[in-house]
Image (cartoon, rainbow, N blue to C red):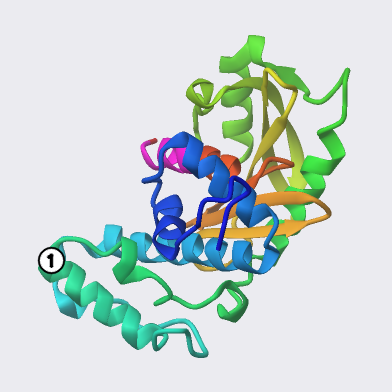
Amino acid sequence: MTSETGNPVSEDELHALVDRRLDVDRAAQVRAYLDADGELANEVENWRTNDAALSEILSAYAYGEASDIPAPTRVGSSRFGGWPAMAAAVLVAFGLGGGSGYLARGMAQPAGQVADTGSGWLEVAARDVFLTYVREVRHPVEVDASERDHLVNWLGNRIEKPFTAPSLGDLGFELVGGRLLPVGGKPGAMLMYENAQGDRATILMARNAGARDTAFQFSQDLGVNTFRWIDGPLAYAISGFLDRGSLEDISREVYAHFENI
């Protein structure tokens, strides 16, 4: 494998890209290579998803006993043996104190083989909300960022979850504002962010329609990339025309923000 600069792209470098261990210039070269190879790009994205799933398990059970490992909830087989191998990886993590990187590669199911969690409604809602408001010039939001406190208090009351707006300035995005909207027949909240280049991303918060908790799930439709997850009574989704890596960076910041509230 070679990048657009002619330098070979090794599997180690692909793993390093997922683990954020490449320097900025080399990461850009490897991403450009992936942009030209859709099949490999999808495989690498599956690695990201698998890592997120394993990290979710480890974060929940890091101080537990081996008997605390949750029962398998996925179906099918993977490159390295499916969920029995995942459970083995978790056991090793308990003993060695780590479970990401090479050990975790391919041990979770590819995205297409994950059992249905009933969260497809969230993907559709997030995409439609983004496409509806992303190109609005005069009225992309109901309440703009100049009324930040009022905005989050109002939306928090309506979705029955007090919150504060994430700060994404380190990633180059600033809050535009937000709006109340219906999602699945219940009040939902949208926050919109924009960078200096005019790229926008939306955060959708909605009441959980009954799906079980999920780690990050990635989807792409109509040119819109979306990362979504469900945490108890609330569902979250971040959407944009941004590349997967940039949107994932935003999603991790947003996830960490809401986890700390």
Rendered location of residue 145, percent (x, y) = 65, 15
Rendered location of residue 157, percent (x, y) = 58, 33
Instruction: Give the quadrant of residue 85.
Output: bottom left
Characterize the magenta stretch by its predominant secondary structure: helix
**From the viewer's perspective, is residue 133 above or below residue 225?**
above
Instruction: Give the quadrant of residue 28.
Output: top right
Q: Disc 1 marks which amino acid?
A: Leu
**From the viewer's perspective, is residue 249 above or below residue 47?**
above
* 223 in the magenta segment: no
Rendered location of residue 51, percent (x, y) = 41, 62
- The residue tagged 1 is 96
Task: Say whether residue 58 is visible.
Answer: yes
Tally the numbered discs.
Answer: 1
Could you say whether the residue bearing mark 1 is in a helix, strand or loop? helix
Q: Is residue 60 left or right of residue 160?
A: left
Q: Nearer the viewer, residue 121 or 102?
A: 102
Farthest residue, direction left: 95
Q: Is residue 243 left or right of residue 59?
A: right
Rendered location of residue 146, percent (x, y) = 65, 9
Query: Which span is picked out in magenta?
Result: 252-260
